Image: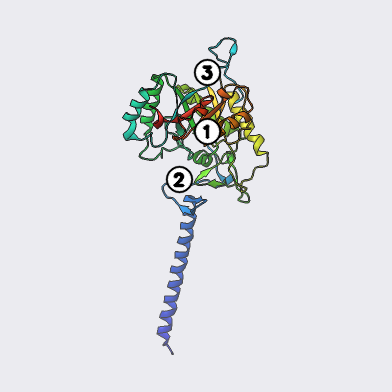
Amino acid sequence: MIFSYRTRHILRQLGKILLIILAIAAALLVCFMVWAGRYMAYDRAAGALLDFNMGPIPEGVLATPPSPTVPPNIYYKDPTSDLPNNELKQTSIQGYYLTAEDLRSEKLPELKSRLETLKAGTAVMLEVKAPKGWFYFSTEIDDHYEDQAPKYALSVQEMDELIKFMDSRGLYMVARLSAFRDYWFGRYHVSSGLPEKGKGGALWMDNGCYWLDPTDDETLNYLVRITRELKALGFDEVVYDDFRFPVTDKVFFPGNQAQSIVYAAVTIATACATDQFCVSFAVSDPTFPLPEGNCRLYFQGVAAADAETVAQQVMTDSAASHVLFMTTASDASDTRFEKYSVLRPLESAL
């Protein structure tokens, strides 16, 4: 087909215009991809995800952490004691733990009624910080940790109210918190996390959470600050959950993982455990070295028939004081747990 000169001229002009439009579209696409990359998250199960509701996530060593406040001396042990001769107030405890089902806004009046029936000194454990990193209670730790708790859960104000109520009842309050699995702290303190192998310093993520380095001073200072704040609120004991390394071979850590976890436990216990405040660790290995002082090991999911075998493996002269079992509702009345410290689900309370 032969086109006239005028037609060919028009087609050339249209072609130039089309190329310009395509070039502009390509440039806009590249700019969008660069901008959207700030909101890219990686989930182990779902893969790459775009979440425009969160701020940009720093990538590895390029992130600049905020200027930290003066950290507490994590090697200092509080010498205060109400007991003569500095004897430890380490005794066995019996009580209950609250589940997410218990900690619902619409159930708060019923929960208070049930707690009111418990005798003073009864132990009650509640979770105060989620693995994602947000706090369920009012805290001055850091303004960056947004309140993103599930809407059905107790609000921060309601949790504060519950803590004050429990304290006024004279209950033995145990705070449970995730230790080394923390999305928000990992996001703002990249140098305190565990980098993924071959990713240039970017942190490894597991199910939407970063894992922290147990040997990092900033990580340990963070846990110590939380613990001291809980102590000031009236808690008698703190138990660290997720007190371990993630089960994966994808993180880069040059040291000995087992020794590093023990180091972290000793450091925190030395800084926080006192005669009147117990520092505990939820573990699965009964041979985990228990730090000296007012400390305990928590075990969950242990059958009543295996309780004594597990307790005998703990390196302590007083298993009744230093070993605690969290039972299921079906095992709550099993007497084989009673020679040790025990926490049962609140639903099992009469």
Disc 1 crowd, CA 10 A, few/some/many (<14, 14-19, 20+): some
For the residue pair 122 and 238, the one nearer the viewer reads as 122
Q: How is the image coloured?
A: rainbow
Residue 304 circle label? 1
Select label 1 or label 3 by which is in front.
Answer: 1
Q: Farthest residue in the top direction? A: 84
Which label is found at residue 55?
A: 2
Instruction: Looking at this view, name the residue that lies furthest to the right.
Output: 255
Residue ID for mark 3: 276
* Residue 340 is at least partly visible in this image: yes
Q: Position of residue 289 (x, y in %)?
A: 64, 30
Residue 97: image location, x then y, percent: 44, 30
Q: Amino acid at mark 1?
A: Ala
User: Residue 189's spot in the image, x, y percent?
Assistant: 55, 39
- Label 2 or label 1, whichever lies nearer to me, is 1
| Residue 273 location, quadrant | top right
Is residue 1 placed above or below 346 in the rendered structure?
below
Front-most of 144 and 66? Answer: 144
Q: Secondary structure at mark 3?
A: loop
For the point 57% across and 39% down, which residue is it? 212
